[in-house]
Amino acid sequence: MHPTPPRLSAAQILLCGAAIVTLSTGIRHGFGLWMLPITQATGWSRETFSLALAIQNLAWGLIGVFGGMLADRYGAFRVLVGGALLYALGLAGMALSPTPLLFALTTGVTIGAAQAGTTYAIIYGVIGRQLPPERRSWAMGVAAAAGSFGQFLLMPIEGQMILRLGWQTALLTLAATVLLIVPLAWGLREPGMHASARAPRRQSVRHAIGEALGHPPFLLLTTGYFVCGFQVMFIAVHLPGYLADRALSPQVAAFALALIGLFNVVGSYAAGALGQRLAKHHILAFIYFTRAVVIGVFLLVPISAASVYVFAALMGMLWLSTVPPTNAAVAQIFGVQHFSMLSGIAFFSHQLGSFMGVWLGGWLYDATSSYDVVWWLTIALGVAAGLINLPVRETPIARAPEHAA
């Protein structure tokens, strides 16, 4: 028998975890602001820029599965430190890459690997292991709200940095700033993780993966998550270009993305808090259906700075609000022994959607000189995702005793 290790306090987890997510996701959400400066300075097409960010999302999702395995086994601290170092290296490469290939390797693969080790799956793993079930969904909402606050805080700062410092110096400054994750990760060192890593595992990784992939509710959740990734990354990356094509200033786009972050603080927290009392699949269906309506109205009304700000506020309420109920449902169904890994598998589906949203937006724009097709596709996918989540059941899975988690 192994003694139960002491737990980290909820305050320590949320303060350090929220600060890390604020940095990692706040910087990430601003990448769309660099599309026009970089393509204009280098002569590359929007598709070239979009492909690098699409690779970033794909790398994040794929490597996130293995990052989750490591965090489940050895704790979050080492994964977070490695992710922070990769983030700094990738941002420097984004600033200095002279060719599209090197830009794709640094902006795409390196930053994608960095995000796999510094964002939600890793922080949510700590929450799942350290906090009791009755507080998990709420705490995940707090962490998601922190990521949204990072978007609100850093988006206008990044816009001003580009204007005042130039796009390359701004990226190098962010490369130094992201290293603040290293001391923050020290506060998430989980007691007993080394001992638990040497202890026998009650469920193997192979069995956990097979169990999840053979369980219909997990497949439905991950399919809906694909749509979430498609929608939010298409908007995050291509909204500045869409607005510029309609003669709105870059500052309108920067302020709109900041508004998404501000209102998502409320939306993410509310989704996490409601997940303690309501069925999580009902919350998810409502979010996806409402996104489809909001996007449709945005496309139909005359575009102006005011209509953009209203759209941003409403989308902000729905932006990352899928993250707490999706992850809380996974933890409720499968337990927490392999939670970071299973969360990473679900998030890989999200990132496949992100890849398609970012890349398809750039490809179709270059092919048609318009984003219209992709906008209407986001509406259709939103309706489909709402329908997909309705039959999900969150009952804990029944296991044979030797496989109990």
Image: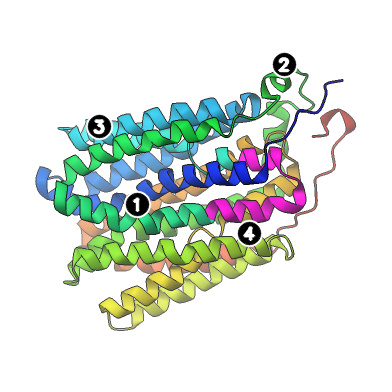
Under mark 1, the amino acid is: Val
Labels 1 & 3 near each other (Cβ < 8 A): no
Asked which colour scheme the image uses, the reply is rainbow
Q: Which mark is residue 358?
A: 1
Q: Quadrant of the N terminus?
A: top right
N-terminal of the two: label 1 or label 3?
3
Q: Nearer the viewer, mark 1 or mark 2?
A: 2
Mark nearer the N terminus (3 vs 2): 3
Q: Please, is residue 336 above or below residue 266 in the view?
A: above
* Image coordinates for residue 85, horizontal then vertical, percent: 38, 28
Please tell me whether residue 130 belongs to the stretch shown in magenta: yes
Q: Quick one: label 1 or label 2, which is nearer the N terminus?
A: 2
Spatial separation of the CA atoms under disc 3 and disc 2: 38 Å
Q: Residue furthest bottom?
A: 301
Left or right, 307 with respect to 69, comes to: left
In this figure, which residue is indicated by the disc labeled 2? 198
Quick check: 99 above or below 232?
above
Callout 3, which amino acid? Answer: Gly
Between 291 and 128, the residue placed more toward the observer is 128
For mark 3, does the 10 Å Cα neighbourhood hold few (<14), some (14 to 19), or many (20 or more) residues? Answer: many
> Which residue is at a point 23% across and 30% down the rendered structure image?
102
Residue linked to disc 4: 272
